[in-house]
Image (cartoon, rainbow, N blue to C red):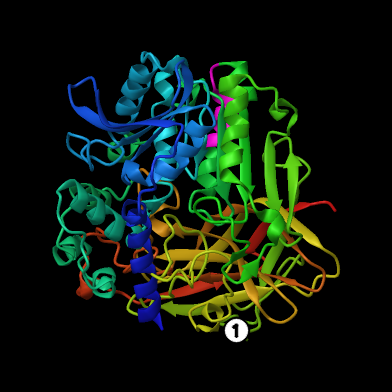
Amino acid sequence: MMTLQLRILAVGVLLAGITLAQRPVPPIPAGVKFEANVLVPMRDGIRLAADIYRPDKEGKFPVLLSRTPYNKNGQRAMATFLAENGYATVVMDSRGLYSSYGTWHPYVDEAQDGYDTQQWIGQQPWCDGKIGMFGTSYPGFTQLLPAPYRSPFVKAIMPVAAQSDNYGAIWSTDGIYHLALALSWGPSQEAIAEEKPRPEPSWVRVMNLLPLKSAMDVIGVYSQFVADTMTHESYDDFWRKMSIRDKYAEMDVPAFHITGWYDDLTHETLINFTNMRKQSRSEYARRWQKLLIGPWGHGIRTDPKYGDMDFGPQMTTDSRNLHLHWYDYHLKGVQNGLDKEAPIRIYVMGENVWRDEQEWPLARAKPARFFLHSEGLANTRMGDGTLSDKTPAGEVPDKYAYDPRYPAPTYGGHGSGGGGITPDSAFSINGPMDQRSIQQRNDVLVYSSDVLTNDVEVTGAIDVNLFFSTDVKDTDFFATVSDVYPDGRAILITEGAIRARFRESVEHPKLLTPNEVYDVKIPIWETSNVFKKGHRIRLHITSSNFPRFNRNLNSGKAMAEETENDIRVANQIILHDSKHPSSILLPVIPR
């Protein structure tokens, strides 16, 4: 079973990054003037290739720009649509990829290259002096990276599924390495840069390979960037140089931030939104931060069926018209009612309705703490683990053995790049998947509330406060919240994780002392879900989520160097008594 899931995820993540380049390129429609591979000079003399789409008539136009590592041809449909609606549209290949010159260095050149491109566009005779941007994922991040340079031509941006940096998400979750994405996306992009065939190794073998640093030998394409992400386990200058977390005060641009509750960038998007709303240089920019969060993963979904859920046709969002609505107001001055809309719009799952909000986090949220309870037998969903607001007294701790040779497989949850999509797109292991199969493992502790007598809405960030001890120097804990239906389905709502060595600081890791009791907080990604009357709220805890994340071998050694001989079985003890009240804190919205 694990082998099948490994194959599905590995193939899916790889396909997600390259499918745009493989799609047939649509023809240029009448009424659109097209220029291919226009070479735009950067400050160092390197020229980057851009395709330009313009309304086929005289005049100056507002311009929409997208900068992408996924082949500019993949944006033709969107670009021609925008040109047909009165925008000049520029789509550019990232440095060192496809038709652009230079050397491919993921992320690090995008800030200056983006600014130089903006400045070049602003001086073109067909530009009216107003620029916006568009794009999802990496092309979402290329909108934010140049923002601190504050091009006077850029009047608004619209980053969909964009991070604030690569250490908190995408490449790592505060030190827990995103294995499947790194080993598939990184070498694949490097192969494109080197004009080599895309790698097609046995992804099952690659994901299980030790030491981790040897994985690219099997893949057949070496990426120095991927190698560096493995060796820079702590948050350091390597990560800072591709981060915007300390640059919000230098920004001054309206931005429409879009993400999904199952995006790997839910939390990152909220970091961008809240900080640009607080720290942007002008009141105008602070006022014009807008947020949309839907019931999808990485990118806007139109199919209401996702994972094991159907969110209803009302969830459908027209991405193209969303762009026009935003940019017609900001670039064309069309009074279309945008200024009358709420700054925040979220999809409340469970009730399956859209709702407008004025703030984030919601001030009316009331913290509700549920404590973990059991008689020491919380293993599996058939165990005796419970959640209640009753403070624990003298209770027996729960125990399980985490063996890195038999990790809990990835099944549902937050995903980026479309990871988990099989070649026929018939099945996804990202998103709201039923967790009962995972919750049958003996190395998974399961705690469930009583059947709810009223609807309970949880909207916001969740924290798990965990008291534990272990007999190893380092280990991981993954916490997952699910909505248990009357028929037994346990639909994943949100999740979070912590690598113990980074419990105090992501910059200065500190190994554990075996058998000592620790108190850690596991931050859970934000969500909005109504747990309906007759349902139960469930938390499960384990120590792996593979291959989305690399296995912690529990040795405390450098991740890239560990071998099979370094594997240690971690005997985990989760305490929940009066002195060690392990709990989950939920932001409950009064009904």
Q: Is residue 510 left or right of residue 37?
A: right
Instruction: Magenta stretch: give its range.
Output: 272-281
The location of residue 227, given as percent across then percent down, is 21, 52
Residue 558: image quadrant is bottom left
Dot 1: few (<14), some (14–19), or many (≥20) neighbours within 10 Å?
some
Is 274 magenta? The answer is yes
- The residue drawn where x is 28% and y is 37% is 94
Residue 583: image quadrant is bottom right
Instruction: Let me know if residue 391 appears in the view.
Output: yes
- The residue drawn where x is 74% and y is 41% is 356
Amino acid type assigned to the residue bearing label 1 in the image: Leu
Quick check: 153 above or below 473? Answer: above
Number of numbered discs present? 1
Q: Which residue occupies the foreground of this view, 211 or 122?
A: 122
Q: Which residue occupies the foreground of this view, 417 or 378?
A: 417
The location of residue 23, given as percent across then percent down, is 36, 55
Q: Which residue occupies the foreground of this view, 542 or 180?
A: 180
The location of residue 433, given as percent across then percent down, is 57, 71
Quick check: 404 above or below 24? Answer: below
Quadrant housing the N terminus: bottom left
- The residue drawn where x is 42% and y is 62% is 419
Quick check: 474 above or below 56? Answer: below
Is 385 magenta? The answer is no
For mark 1, give the secondary structure. Answer: loop
Please give the residue where the numbered disc 1 appears in the rendered image. 377
